[in-house]
Image: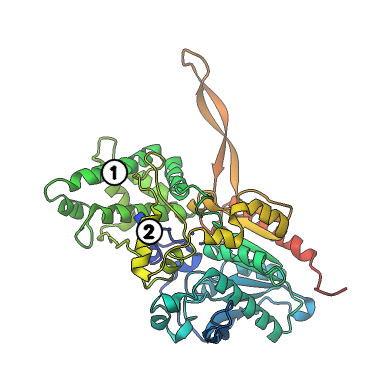
Amino acid sequence: MAQLHHFSILKVSLLVLIALTYVSGKSFRTTKLGARNIFLRTTVDNESTTNSEEYEVYNYTQTLDHFNFKTESYTTFQQRYVVNSKYWGGPTNNSPIFLYAGAESDIMGDVQYGGFEHVLASRFNALLVYIEHRYYGTSMPFGSKDKAYKNADTLGYFSSEQALADYAQTILDVKKKMSAENCPVIVIGGSYGGMLASWFRLKYPHIAYGALASSAPILYFSGLTPENGYSSVVSKDFKSISTSCYKTIRESWFEIDRVALQPHGLAHLSRAFNTCLPLNTTHELKYSLELLYDVMAQYDNPTDNNIQTFCKATDGAGEKTYILDKILSGLATIYGDRCHDVFDPSISKDFGWDWQSCTEMVMPMGNGEDDTMFQADPFDLDKYSKKCEQAFGVTPRPYWAPIEFGGYDIKTVLEKFASNIIFSNGLRDPYSSGGVLQNISDTVVAVYTQEDRVVSGWQIVSKIATLELTMVRVIYILGHHCLDVEAPTATDPDWLVAQRDTEIKIIEGWLSKYTVPNAS
């Protein structure tokens, strides 16, 4: 969940390498939300404390624990934030401030590869403020990552609630320093950052005037979204491109298992799939393949069409081709002839998202017997909890986030207590299964895109199977993870341009009604 820029998204192989940094194992996973800036170019200066012509980098002396008055709670750390005043109309005009909610990665990726927030800032003469999430990038309590990630005691201050309080305290300080106390703040975030944006508006309505929450799966928690929601959308994405490709993937898992049971089966699979290291289990191979399919679906932007490329190759191999050779034909279009990385699916003590998903961001993901293109693999909370206890010494609290943020009765919560929130989604994004997909009120709105096309097709018009050419109305669901908040390009399809225009008009409506607090 992520959360949620890939620009050209590079090759899917690189997507997998990057995404894996943030994904727990399939059997016990709550899949990486994929904040858009995980796709960082190698030129990103992740340790940057210097300024550029467009932005200035600062550190705010942040409180370690906002919710206690114990002596250690008053400990402080340096939290990085970045200010871009290129577009700002200044405080005298009450020009808005767009606060970018940092998520589960270094904030400099978002700053250096700016997206839709620059369009908004230019349109509304706004100040851009990016705040890094605690325990990511350089914003490390206790002075370093080694010390911050040492154990559960030092990681215990690592939560979404603390992060939201950080943002509140930091943005108020920024407004004071810039004499911008009367300027409205609108929070922007994608994926997990989108969840934070919507929650910030709910928790701190006196600070945030509105929020744009892109691909924010605030409902992907126990009792709210079916555990197969993510995999179901991945499966639909593939099936919509090619039913035969979908069937090939679905049947391939059982063939992998069959081959593995043969003498030297794992060695044979290692050679066939050209793995960089020998396979120890079929789970390693199947996990890596499933992750690849997940990422292809989650980030299949209109320019790359990775699923279409993969499926065209698998289908083109021929109907009588051996099923694993079909898969290999698809992989060849992604990897080329280099070896295939196989990854350890275990929870890592070094990755922040693993801590978060082992504490409060528990997004159960599993598959039933015949409900997706993947093998049956139901989410097992007991097993998942044991993995978290082994890694961190903590037990997950799977019901806490919905209690804290109102998920179990979200419609009533949003109707009664919320306003000025855009929940934007791409319906081909697997995380849309846990998103808000219907308007709640005039000011809490769901924005997504589907095309209603009329196409020609054949249909049976009589019992003797007479065929007649007719016009058929087809609904195409569109959009992938955080696509709307990426940087616009000249090749963006009309539906994506229209979606962003809708968001601009909604925000314009909010700002037209803004009044300075206590002005009367």
Furthest-front residue in view?
70
- Mark 2: secondary structure: helix
- Observer-nearest of 129 and 473: 129
Furthest-left residue in view?
263
* Three-letter code, disc 2: Tyr
For residue 188, above or below residue 424:
below
- Observer-nearest of 52 and 348: 348
Residue 101: percent from the left, percent from the top? 58, 70
For residue 24, above or below residue 204:
above
Furthest-right residue in view?
520
Sort mark 1 into few (<14), some (14-19) or many (20+) by Cα contacts within 10 Å. Answer: many
Q: Is residue 424 visible?
A: yes
Indicate which label's residue lies in the foreground, 2 or 1.
2
Residue at image position (27%, 59%) is 340
Q: Is residue 494 visible?
A: no
Do the residues under discs 2 and 1 have CB atoms within 8 angstroms? no
Horizontal side of 291 relative to 53 (left or right) equals left
Spatial CA distance of label 2 from label 1 is 26 Å
Horizontal side of 28 relative to 89 (left or right) equals left
Residue 391: percent from the left, percent from the top? 35, 68
Residue 440: percent from the left, percent from the top? 68, 51
- Observer-nearest of 231 and 328: 231
Horizontal side of 198 relative to 227 (left or right) equals right
Residue where numbered disc 1 is placed: 252
Q: Earlier in the sequence, mark 2 or mark 1?
A: 1
Which disc is residue 384 wearing?
Answer: 2
